[in-house]
Image (spheres, helix red, strand yellow):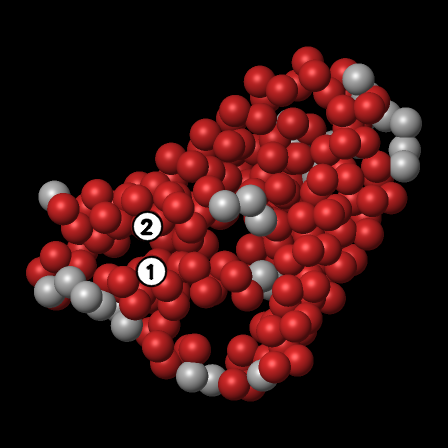
Amino acid sequence: MTPFFQGLGTGGSLIVAIGAQNAFILSQGIRKNHPLIIAAICIFCDILFITLGVAGIGAAVSRSVLLSRLTAWGGTIFLFLYGFQAFRSAMENKSLSAADQGHMSLRTAIISTLAVTLLNPHFYLDTVVLIGSIASRFPHGQRVYFWAGSVTASTLWFISLSIGARVFAPVFKNPLAWRILDAVIGLTLWSIAFSLTRYAITL
């Protein structure tokens, strides 16, 4: 069971780190915008790319300078735009009841979740490259346990984050709480975007 628990710890430490995807899930969970579907999409994407990483594809992808550059600049643009939207939302005087009136459609929720996940180069770095490189240290027969641990960490985290966001719903009846959340999300997204910009320039 050692590979399983190492996969659980590795996956958890990488996934739990605050980032664009987690900020999006938290904000939509509080707004009650299809939280379980959003969590399911994130879990599916993690399972797919963790599987690719453990299978050994991570090393090949990381060697492609063109793919790395396109992904970095695409993610930078998306994060800047999404961060701008969060800052603009922070300027509005809204409460939870007001926010509930503008629910995101299922189609928009699916597209937004895929975008905030697949346009973020850190997603590939964590799931494919880092988890894949660590898995390569185990014998072939034990990698499946490492994979299972990583997938378990992802599943538990996204479900907990999505459902747990509802606990904070009473807090967000106060408009100031929304402004703080949106501002924190905007700062988080722009900080990631700036780091991606530096990374893209060095490629």
* Residue 96 at x, y percent in the picture: 76, 21
The residue pinned by badge 1 equals 131
Q: Looking at the picture, does residue 36 appear above or below residue 46? A: above
The N terminus appears in which quarter of the rendering?
Answer: top left
Residue at the farthest top position: 170
Residue drawn at 54 percent across, 78 percent down: 68
* Residue 153 at x, y percent in the picture: 34, 41
Q: Residues within 10 Å of mark 1 (few under 14, many from 20)?
A: many
Residues at badges 2 and 1 in contact (C-beta under 8 Å)? yes
Can the viewer see residue 143?
A: yes
Q: Amino acid at mark 2?
A: Thr
Quarter holding residue 100: top right
Q: Looking at the picture, does residue 48 appear above or below residue 107? A: below
Q: Nearer the viewer, residue 36 or 154?
A: 154
* Residue 180 at x, y percent in the picture: 77, 32
SS for dot 1: helix
SS for dot 2: helix
Relative to 158, is 3 on the left or the right? left
Residue drawn at 44 percent across, 47 percent down: 15
Residue drawn at 65 percent across, 27 percent down: 30
Q: Nearer the viewer, residue 186 or 160?
A: 186
Q: Amino acid at mark 1?
A: Ile
Residue drawn at 51 percent across, 26 percent down: 163
Q: Nearer the viewer, residue 196 or 111?
A: 196
- Gap in angstroms between the C-alphas marked 2 and 1: 7 Å
The residue pinned by badge 2 equals 10
The C terminus appears in which quarter of the rendering?
Answer: bottom right
